[in-house]
Amino acid sequence: MSLHNPHIDWQTFTDGLWKENPVFVMLLGMCPVLAVTNSAINALAMGIATTFVLLASGLMVSLLRHLIPKQVRIATYILIIATFVTIVDYLIQAISLELYNALGAFIQLIVVNCMILGRAEAYASKHRVPKALLNALGMGLGFTFALLCLGVVREVLGAGSLFGVDLFGSQFEPWVVMVLPPGGFIVLGGWLLLFEWLRERRAAAQLEKEAARAR
């Protein structure tokens, strides 16, 4: 799908959602994935915060890519990322103190999220603004999608609710382990198995199509 620019294609956006999903394929940013996904609202908030930092830092790195000396590029990227993480930190604190306390230090730790620094170094520093933004948006949405996948399952099974709304009434016996750290590993393992099975099934279907064309 062309976006009116021959150098921008649909794959630039969709790679982060599926082929290079930062959690289910690249296994990046595991600390917040396991720590804050004990509820869907925490997962969504962390996903939005990370997407904002990805977009803003990708924009700045792409704009300044010809001005940043190679010798100090990593330090400069970290400084740019830290600036936008500070903005996100104050914004969440101003909007909801309860959410701020629930996310804890993992908001500040976005600074050292290897996915964001990796996007700045491997992509935004080598591409123009539109392509860098499209790639950052795809990665951010892919990261948010993965966090939500874990958050929804853990909250439904561990608390019997979704986004704080009770689903099953007083008769439901919650699986407390799901909102504890071991529950994060269990649910992540299940999603990784499902995601890999879907990828293999899709690859097999693609091979069948190519074989049918070759006949």
Image (spheres, rainbow, N blue to C red):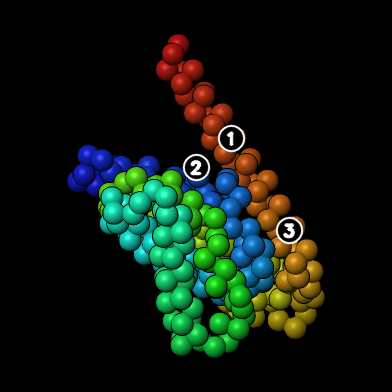
Q: Secondary structure at mark 1?
A: helix
Residue 19 is marked as: 2
Is 175 rendered above or below residue 150? below
Say which residue appears at 45% left-offset and 11% top-offset. 215
Query: Residue visible at 54% across and 51% down?
Result: 22
Residue placed most toward the observer, 165 or 170: 165
Q: Which comes sooner in the sequence, label 3 or label 2?
A: 2
- N-terminal-most mark, 2 or 1: 2
Label 2 sits on a secondary structure element that is loop
Q: Is residue 122 visible?
A: yes
- Amino acid type, callout 1: Arg
The residue to which callout 3 is attached is 185
Quadrant for the N terminus in the image: top left
At label 2, the amino acid type is Lys
Residue at 55 percent of width and 73 percent of height: 107
Viewer-side label of 2, 1? 2
N-terminal of the pair, mark 3 or mark 1, is 3
Residue type at mark 3: give it.
Phe
Q: Position of residue 198 (x, y in %)?
A: 59, 41
Q: CA distance from mark 2 to mark 1?
A: 13 Å
- Say which of marks 3 and 1 sits in front: 3
The percent coordinates of residue 167 (x first, y second) are: 65, 76
How many badges with numbers are in the image? Answer: 3
Between 9 and 49, the residue placed more toward the observer is: 49
Q: Residues within 10 Å of mark 1 (few under 14, many from 20)?
A: few
At 49% from the left and 17% from the top, the residue drawn is 211
- Where residue 83 sits: x, y (%)? 42, 71
Question: Could you tell me if residue 131 is visible in this image?
Answer: no
Residue beneath disc 1: 201
Q: Outermost residue toward the front? A: 71
Q: Position of residue 36 (x, y in %)?
A: 63, 70
